[in-house]
Image (tube, rainbow, N blue to C red):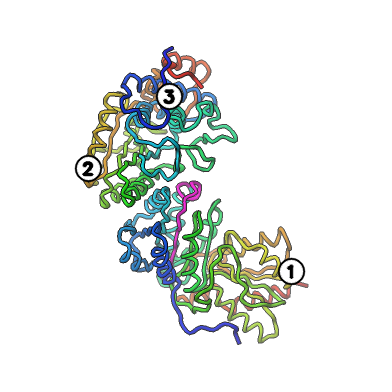
């Protein structure tokens, strides 16, 4: 086991890609152990977005040392597809927002780690509740506009699921953000092609997403969310595209369940917990790099 | 003779518009959002004076609620404006998750509430909004009665930390509360002292209650009139104290019986001091097109209906 040190909050400019990959490996272990421990949760999407969120918190975003709800003078992140909460909790804990030991309380009574992210219990790192889908983009746009009003040139990031954007509110926000030139906003879509009832293509096809967002007046970039090199490069590129009068959309191809062979590429692990044997088989595929909680 | 008089009638929504402008001048954290109803909501003066703090969101109320939640994060105080129907029922889940559950300091300002928007009919006449909003944890619910009170409430909620539902209306109604009356959230106002029946009224029904008091007085009945402008948190102390004196209650509001002020009062009475209570409110029905006056009469929300309810409540005492 190779132990590596993670920084507390505040990105590490020169953190290497292999180090980010090692953090993502530990985050994936945490996700599986949390969902197994709670006997419920959403491992598929969480595993698929582990590389993206690791890159965001350890490389891309500029954050303060202490969590403050107001988020002034720092980048902000909103998770709209709140069901991938175990991923967010693990990344927040390793980034220093709270102790990793708290991850064991996920989805249990009297916990700050609710099934879907919430502010009610005061978990550091969370600025709005999410889980009922389609709301996070609106919230992120509002927060981004206030950054502009405050002349704070930091960015606002938001992640949505691909199935999630079947919600109409997303498109209200898409029209609004372009019209109001909210160009300090970098949205990403977890484009894994899966939703609860099956492939998005079968449930309700999104057709040409790139054309859709471009037609709505957004700058669209495409990335591979399971290639750390690519996701870091594309997010850096996205940052360089801010301030040009248009919001930015990162269409991020991922594989649901990435990192565990038998969970890969299927909607079956969208919202199912692994058994003891399945957990063991899954963990054997993921290096313990920071120590299990 | 009624103990209250008026020289002018104005719409409560204009009180909101004036209050928002003043709130904007007093506090540069106040921001306004409107879903394509600037004229109806009287938000034009605020927009004109503070264009950088005003956001036109178009006909997209769900997005407006999310935007407002996001804008509240860094300490801004968003006031959203649209009709009561589109401020509540249409966006209930957005308010629930992004605003109430997330504890966001958003002021949901709703015009054209109740039957008195008149001719547009039931699609626009929401009579369930108080119920929906009062059920949400963390939410404060306010329904002022005239121009002055609406203006004062609009200012007061800027200084209160937490989500608020502020409900007002379209028609011109008498201005009878003092211009300089301080608005204290959650504090009922005693308008008339009485001993035979307690009449608890909110919104447009407060003036009707005042007129009812005069009619009752002419029949030798002493009615106590209390203006409950804040439905949540409810001034339970004022309610209990009043019914201990009078022994019966009437509630009056431009809302369904289910979920309204009367229901909140009934809960308070049952738990503390049960007395007969009559409800002046809409009884499990949608509204329809018509003039405000015709609608209030047809759906039982006039001074005469309050008088009848008071007589019935008094009769039930023995």
Name the residue beneath numbered marker 2.
Answer: A214
Rendered-image quadrant of the C terminus of chain B? bottom right
Q: Mark 1 vs mark 2: same chain?
A: no
Q: Which residue is at a point 72% across and 75% down the rendered structure image?
A: B314
When asked about the image quadrant of residue A140, the answer is top left
Q: Which residues are magenta?
A: B97-111
Q: Chain of mark 2?
A: A
B37 within the magenta span: no
Question: Which callout, 2 or 3, points at the residue further toward the start of the chain?
Answer: 3
Residue A76 in sight in this render: yes
Q: Mark 2 vs mark 3: same chain?
A: yes
When asked about the image quadrant of residue B112, the answer is bottom left
Q: Please say if A2 is above or below A85.
A: above
On residue B244, the disc is 1
Q: Nearer the viewer, residue A204 or A113?
A: A113
Q: CA distance from mark 1 to mark 2?
A: 67 Å
Horizontal and vertical percent for residue B113? 47, 66
Q: CA distance from mark 2 to mark 3?
A: 33 Å
Residue A208 in sight in this render: no
Horizontal and vertical percent for residue B304? 59, 79
Q: Is residue B270 left or right of residue B253?
A: right
Horizontal and vertical percent for residue B51? 30, 61
B106 within the magenta span: yes
Mark 2 lies on a secondary structure that is: helix
On residue A127, the disc is none
When asked about the image quadrant of residue B107, the answer is bottom left
Q: Which residue is at a point 50% across and 66% down the rendered structure image?
A: B153
Q: CA distance from mark 3 to mark 1?
A: 62 Å
- Disc nearest the viewer among 3 and 1: 3
Name the residue beneath numbered marker 3.
Answer: A27
Q: Mark 3 vs mark 1: same chain?
A: no
Q: Which residue is at a point 56% across and 54% down the rendered structure image?
A: B135
């Amino acid at each position: 086991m190779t132990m590596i040190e993670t920084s507390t909050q505040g990105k590490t400019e020169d953190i290497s890609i292999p180090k980010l990959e090692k953090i993502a490996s530990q985050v994936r272990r945490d996700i599986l152990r949390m969902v197994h421990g709670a006997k419920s949760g959403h491992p598929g999407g969480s595993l698929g977005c582990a590389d993206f969120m690791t890159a965001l918190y350890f490389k891309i975003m500029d954050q303060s040392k202490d969590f403050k709800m107001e988020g002034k003078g720092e980048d902000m992140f909103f998770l709209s597809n709140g069901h991938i909460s175990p991923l967010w909790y693990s990344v927040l804990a390793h980034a220093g927002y709270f102790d990793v030991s708290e991850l064991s309380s996920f989805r249990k009574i009297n916990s700050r780690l609710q099934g879907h992210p919430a502010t009610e219990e005061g978990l550091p790192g969370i600025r709005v509740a999410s889980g009922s889908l389609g709301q996070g983009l609106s919230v992120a746009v509002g927060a981004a506009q206030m950054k502009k009003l405050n002349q704070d040139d930091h960015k606002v990031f938001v992640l949505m699921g691909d199935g999630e954007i079947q919600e109409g509110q997303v498109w209200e926000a898409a029209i609004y953000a372009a019209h109001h030139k909210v160009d300090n906003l970098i949205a990403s879509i977890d484009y894994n092609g899966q939703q609860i009832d099956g492939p998005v293509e079968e449930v309700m096809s999104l057709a040409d997403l790139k054309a859709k967002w471009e037609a709505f007046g957004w700058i669209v970039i495409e990335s591979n969310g399971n290639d750390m090199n690519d996701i870091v490069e594309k997010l850096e590129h996205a940052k360089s595209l801010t301030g040009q009068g248009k919001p930015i959309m990162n269409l991020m191809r991922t594989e649901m369940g990435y990192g565990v062979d038998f969970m890969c590429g299927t909607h079956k692990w969208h919202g199912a917990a692994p058994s003891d044997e399945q957990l063991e088989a899954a963990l054997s595929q993921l290096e313990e790099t920071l120590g299990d909680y | 003779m009624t103990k209250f008089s008026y020289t002018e009638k104005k719409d409560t929504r204009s009180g909101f518009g004036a209050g928002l402008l003043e709130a904007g001048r007093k506090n540069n954290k106040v921001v306004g959002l409107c879903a394509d109803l600037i004229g109806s909501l009287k938000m034009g003066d605020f927009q004109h004076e503070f264009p950088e703090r005003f956001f036109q969101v178009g006909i997209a109320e769900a997005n407006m609620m999310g935007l407002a939640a996001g804008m509240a994060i860094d300490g801004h105080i968003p006031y959203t404006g649209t009709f009561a129907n589109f401020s509540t029922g249409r966006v209930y889940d957005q308010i629930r998750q992004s605003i109430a559950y997330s504890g966001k300091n958003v002021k949901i300002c709703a015009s054209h509430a109740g039957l008195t928007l008149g001719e547009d009919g039931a699609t626009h006449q929401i009579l369930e909004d108080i119920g929906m909003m009062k059920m949400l944890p963390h939410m404060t619910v306010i329904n002022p009665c005239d121009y002055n009170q609406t203006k004062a409430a609009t200012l007061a909620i800027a200084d209160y930390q937490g989500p608020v539902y502020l409900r007002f209306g379209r028609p011109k109604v008498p201005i009878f509360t003092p211009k300089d009356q301080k608005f204290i959230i959650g504090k009922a106002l005693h308008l008339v002292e009485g001993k035979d029946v307690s009449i608890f009224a909110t919104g447009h029904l407060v003036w009707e209650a005042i007129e009812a008091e005069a009619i009752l007085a002419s029949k030798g009945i002493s009615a106590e009139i209390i203006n409950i402008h804040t439905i949540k948190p409810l001034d339970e102390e004022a309610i209990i104290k009043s019914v201990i004196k009078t022994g019966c209650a009437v509630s009056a509001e431009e809302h369904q019986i289910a979920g309204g002020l009367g229901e909140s009062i009934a809960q308070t009475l049952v738990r503390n001091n049960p007395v007969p209570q009559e409800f002046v409110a809409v009884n499990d029905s949608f509204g329809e097109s018509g003039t405000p006056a015709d609608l209030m009469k047809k759906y039982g929300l006039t001074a005469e209906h309050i008088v009848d309810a008071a007589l019935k409540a008094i009769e039930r005492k023995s």
